Image (tube, rainbow, N blue to C red):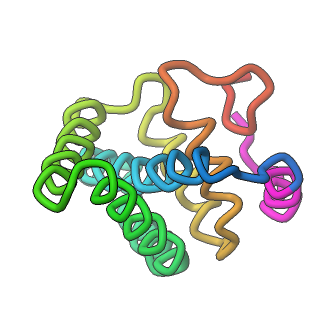
Amino acid sequence: MHFKKTLAAAATAAALTMTPTAASAGSQHEQIRKLDIMLMVTSLRCRMGEHDFQPHYRKFSANHITALNHAARNLESGLVARHGKKGAKRALDRISVGMANQYGQGHPWLGCQELKEITHDLSKSKDSNVLAQAADELLGPAPRSGGRWARR
């Protein structure tokens, strides 16, 4: 597989296709939060093999900390508005535990090597539009046809 499409082109495409409405913005925040959890969980799973990508995940987190924190805060605010403070905490816990359970045994269609390459690519950018595109493509049960990370 070849994952070297430029991040600038991906960010531009994402920016042009994403003009979130208020409803989709909440969903986008949740997707970005889920992307972060998926990469964290899979990096832990892959850490003992030859394709350990924890250093790439740490760089990814550092470079995107503002966008990741923004997504987490906005997701929480939306959940508080819908469920109250206690209900929001339970909903956030369900999201986190659900993601950890879903990806604890690995990604459904990406192995450690591909996840390492993708995380490395994502770690080189600070453009938050790339996060939304990556979340959209990587969190599904199967690769999107024609997506940046689709198997070829």
Q: Is residue 4 magenta?
A: yes
Residue in the foreground of this view, choosing between 45 and 10: 10
Q: Left or right? Give the position of 26 relative to 137.
A: left
Q: Residue at x 47, y 65 (%)?
A: 71
Q: Residue at x 17, y 62 (%)?
A: 85
Number of numbered discs overlaid on the protein picture: 0
Q: Position of residue 115 (x, y in %)?
A: 49, 45
Q: Is residue 75 magenta?
A: no
Q: Residue at x 61, y 57 (%)?
A: 131
**Which quarter of the image is occupied by the C terminus?**
top right
Q: How would you classify the magenta stretch by its main secondary structure?
A: helix
Tell me the magenta residue range: 1-15
**Which quarter of the image is occupied by the N terminus?**
top right
Q: Position of residue 139 (x, y in %)?
A: 49, 35
In the image, residue 140 sits, relative to residue 89, either above or below, namely: above
Q: Left or right? Give the position of 47 relative to 75.
A: left
Residue in the foreground of this view, choosing between 33 and 22: 22
